[in-house]
Amino acid sequence: MCGIAGLRTLDGAPADPAAARAMAARLEHRGPDGAGEHHDGPCALAMTRLALVDPEHGRQPVRSEDGSVVAVLNGEIYDHRDHARRLRAAGHSVAPGSDAEVLVHLYEDHGPAFVRRLRGMFAIALWDARQRRLVLARDAFGIKPLCYARDGRRIAFASELQALLALADVPRDVDPAALHELLACGAVHAPRSILAGVRRLVPGEVLVADDDGVRTALVVERPRPGPVSELRDAPPEALAGELRDRLRSSVRLHLAADRPVGVLLSGGLDSGLLAALAVQEGGPLPAFTASFGERSFDEAAGARALARRLDCPHHEVRVTAGDAAALLAQLARSFDEPRADATALPYWLVCRLAARQVTAVLTGEGGDELFGGYQTYAAGGLPGAALRAAAVAAPAVAALVPSSSARLPLDFRLRRLALGAGLGPLDRHHAFKRLTDPQRVLAEPWRRAAADVLAVHRTRFEATAGAELLARLQDVDLHTFLADDLLLQADRAGMAHGLEVRVPFLDPEVAGFAAALGRRARVRGLETKRVLRAAAAPLLAPEAVRGPKRGFVAPAAAWLRGPLEAFARDVLAPAALRRQGLLDPGAVTAMLDRHAARREDLARPLWALLALTLWHDEVLARPPAAVTSTGAGTLRA
């Protein structure tokens, strides 16, 4: 909904409003409807506003009655009306309409732990003048982003990395461990960012900066999987009605807006169910889809059929390799950290299409992670002996199978199966999803800075000991893949066009229901998302309910063997890679050759290398503004 930025000095100097203003200027795409700022001694806040709720009166920053507490919000507080009623009954003066205003009064009553009471998606910055305290907070799922840079003089924060890079004194050194994570996992996991001097709040974390220093704490967590003995073990059909009611309640909240709302529709189960519930709640809404010329990737026909069934106006954007060549540099600037997944291009384009007609869209992120939608979950449920036998045979079979450019080619799946042979559950799960081995492609000295790329995964996995294995793997994916990859993509692609992306699956009531389910309600054999399919059965056509997983997946393998190959070889040319110093030119050229010759499907790692290389030149090399982050009016040439 907005872009927020600011700083709090730690050395007694007054904060420079020009520094906060310079950061906010790089966030205008997130909030084209207005701007606001606040300066008080060591703290400066700034924001840009996307006016979705109470466009006329909901300006920010918001203030408490005496002006001592000031806040800016990026996101939506869906239960703000309930909070406002309780706050008025307790004696607070709360203007009608604005969801942000309840934050300052909840903080007055409950301190930094007030975020536990919020139902919504948010990144918040709050200044308490009496306590000289800056509070930063992020929602439990990490739907809305917040990053910060800190040294002995100050802490600066912003919705996006590129806003921090407006400051001349924010270091631009790439974090070696983050680089390894990016190339192995496809994303950098919080609290890291791609830069060594910039950190991201992890989902549910609160940061406090006051005269005593800076400290962080995990204040609110999303629902975790419970012990096996406490799971609900009813068949999916018996649970479907309750899930449908919870989703309907969430959709109703996510439709609340004073400007038009649409839906990103892939033609599959998750977005189709959300669209059907939204139509029941508020009538037909515009639907937006990405389509492709390559048949195995194109799901527009299914989306069109679903839109007709729901009587929703349907709009499509055709995505081509030419779009990739023309737009990938612009995407690098929009995402501001390397976006390793080829879904970024269609997602960005469909958000651009939607922003021409609506100001917010519903989308299905979280459905797979909560309800067991990936085939890796089904594979993990196979007997150990069967997995071991398949893994032993996989390398020999893969060598005989020519590499295909289809959506999930056999040779790709066989190689992934072989990678997981003999590994424990978490490492085997990662092997199915691994992007590449960083040691293969990094230049020295980056190669020597090896790190455990699954450190964040292991910590999360260990925290759910005693739960079902499948639930533990889903929880890891919620904490890593969803938060640091899919939700980051949704936020950046939407906000690049002033479009808010809303995710009804990631509501505490829905997530709590999912966390309490036993395995058979989620996955049985090769059947995934069993309870979600049962919930959708009365509302959608059978082909949408029982069909395979869908999404805006680009045919990158075919493009990189055809119309996009010359572009890729130009971007990844040895001279360019030697100038940047991150990647081994010989190894990258060998990967391009191997993929083009159809010896192996290397589209996923090659796309990541393109994203990294373009990010280096489009974001990292972009000059900062002429202000430092402290010192009234100081300039740096």
Image (cartoon, grey):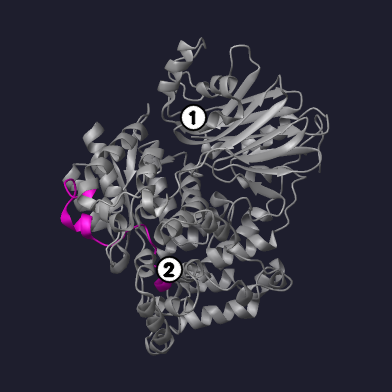
Q: Please provide percent x and percent y for residue 124.
A: 57, 33
Give me the residue at 19% from left, 43% from top.
310
Q: Residue 542 in magenta? A: yes
Q: Please provide percent x and percent y for residue 57.
A: 47, 18
**Residue assigned mark 1:** 117
From the viewer's perspective, is 392 left or right of 202? left
Q: Residue 169 in magenta? A: no
Disc 2 versus disc 1: nearer the observer: 1
From the viewer's perspective, is 540 left or right of 608? left
Query: Vertical placement of 535 versus 454: above or below?
Result: above
Query: Vertical placement of 178 versus 216: above or below?
Result: below
Q: What residue type is labelled 1?
A: Arg
Q: What residue type is labelled 2?
A: Ala
Query: Vertical placement of 98 versus 556: above or below?
Result: above
Give me the residue at 57% from left, 37% from top.
219
Q: Nearer the viewer, residue 304 or 415?
A: 415
Quarter of image, res 62: top right
Give me the residue at 27% from left, 51% from top.
532
Instruction: Please tell me the numbered disc located at residue 411.
Output: none
Q: What stretch is highlighted in magenta?
A: 534-559
Q: Which secondary structure lies at badge 1? A: helix
Give me the residue at 46% from left, 28% from top.
51
Disc 2 residue crowd, few under 14, some 14–19, many 20+, Cα 10 Å: many
**Residue assigned mark 2:** 556
Quarter of image, res 577: bottom right
Q: Please provide percent x and percent y for residue 81.
A: 41, 21
Mark 2 or 1, nearer chain start = 1
